[in-house]
Image (tube, rainbow, N blue to C red):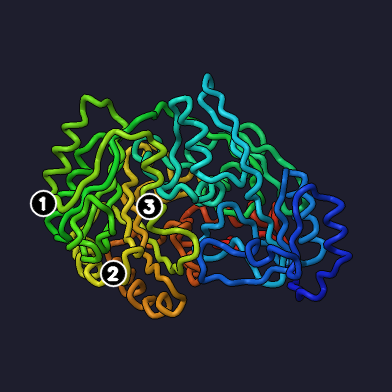
Amino acid sequence: MTAMTISVPAVDDRLADRLRDAVHGEIVRPRDPGYDEARRVYNAMHDKRPALVVRAADAGDVVATVGLAREEGLPLAVRGGSHSVAGYGTCDDGVVLDLGRMRGIRVDPDARTARVEGGATWADVNHATHAFGLATTGGIVSTTGVGGLTTGGGMGHLSRRCGLACDNLESVDLVTADGSFLTCTPERNADLLWAVRGGGGNFGVVTSFSFRLHPVADILGGATFYPLDTEVLRRYRELVADSPENLGSVLVVGLGPPVPFLPAHWHGRPLCGVVTCFSGPEEDDDEIRARLAALGPILGQHVDRIPYPVVNTLFDELVPAGLFHYWKGSFTRGLPDGALDAFVEYGATTPSVQSVTAVFPLDGACHRVAPRDTAFSFRDADYSVALSPTLATAEDCEAHKPWVRAFHRALEPHSLGGGYVNFMDGDDQDRVAANYRDNHARLTALKRRYDPGNLFRLNHNIAP
């Protein structure tokens, strides 16, 4: 049974005052100063007007806010880094639970673990762990929230070596729909820990994560650009197949960015590139450079020894908050020639410099986890593909939706059927069962047990 939605006028001062007595954080109403800032999310396509924005200070605030939304029948949007491309970090006429002030991190360098609050970003995590020469898998844009990326699965530069973010998740603290505060470990509430390892925000609000860390300090990292050519893509495919797991190599297809190491006449022209993150020993750097040189003519390159956190920021300036996004995602086994042909064909008509098609290798450590060991089930996928027209206006983004849909259809014959939930937009709800494959029935049963009223429905929803 779905909770009833009520309108903004019903969320009166009495309700706001009642919540204010129960929380330490800030409550922002539509008439309050700063409301427009408080309701803004990363993807500007989603311009919604919540009745309340609660900027939680601690887990107690989360419990109180979840209770209010449940008791009053209000839609509840949970926001971490606000990067949800589908706009699930906001809503109309409901409550936004903003965890952005809960960003504390405690690193245990001896145990190689980090306890991370639910509103932290990957920039926060990388900064805290790098001081100890440690890291864990976490995205390719530093402003991405830890919560959304991890509960969706979580791929990044270290995936081949360290597994997905959810594979490194050892425990969580979770507030469920009935207001319970549960610590979930392999020994306690193990079913919920399994579910949040890829099942998204369907099962509650994670107020803290405990991650396993790995010895990663300086890496050989940066971008190398090549002509957009099928032969370059074939050689990239061979590079991944033949390279050690400590070589992260995200393929990007799009238009030349305005960076100083790429000649100006390539700015805005179709090309492809490899973003490298080699976490092996420095004495092997020359071999990695030689492998990159063998892919094809280098149009521009900036690859050097850098601190690991830096490689996580390379896309930050290209895709700041406030742009307009629409995404599609798919998984592939290998990179069939037909998929490479689609990259060349549609890459040539990429609508903007910000519209980057990204291809993430998912072999190595990702394959050493069984499909039913976590809610993330695509352990037979070798690559995850993200397609996105990203534009400066809503009108331009709408106008280019047919481009990305056609691109996605061209990849379908070469894809495994589902897609990574964090690369899926709001019109992909019909793909949820395919996204979870054989795990969907178990997830549905857990949803029915822990959230029978579907309070946590603003997500790629697993209906009870």
For the residue marked with disc 2, what is the amino acid? Thr
For the residue marked with disc 3, what is the amino acid? Phe
Give the left or right position of residue 456, taking residue 251 as reference.
right
Q: Is the Cβ of the residue at disc 2 closer than 8 Å to that at disc 3?
A: no
Which quarter of the rendering shows the N terminus?
bottom right
Q: Could you tell me which residue is drawn at 29 percent across and 66 percent down? A: 411
The crowd level at tag 1 (other Cα within 10 Å; few <14, some 14-19, many 20+) is few
Q: Which mark is residue 350?
A: 2
Q: Could you say which quadrant of the image residue 136 lies in?
A: top left
Q: Could you say which quadrant of the image residue 277 lies in?
A: top left
Q: Which residue is mark 1?
A: 297
Q: Position of residue 434 (x, y in %)?
A: 45, 62
Q: Mark 3 or mark 1, which is nearer the start of the sequence?
A: 1
Q: Could you tell me which residue is drawn at 60 percent across and 30 percent down? A: 106
The crowd level at tag 3 (other Cα within 10 Å; few <14, some 14-19, many 20+) is some
Q: Secondary structure at mark 1?
A: loop
Which quarter of the rendering shows the C terminus?
bottom right
Q: Position of residue 5 (x, y in %)?
A: 74, 72
Per the model, the C-alpha gap separating discs 2 and 3 is: 17 Å
Q: Which residue is mark 3?
A: 315
Give the left or right position of residue 235, taking residue 20 as reference.
left
Give the left or right position of residue 195, taking residue 178 as reference.
left
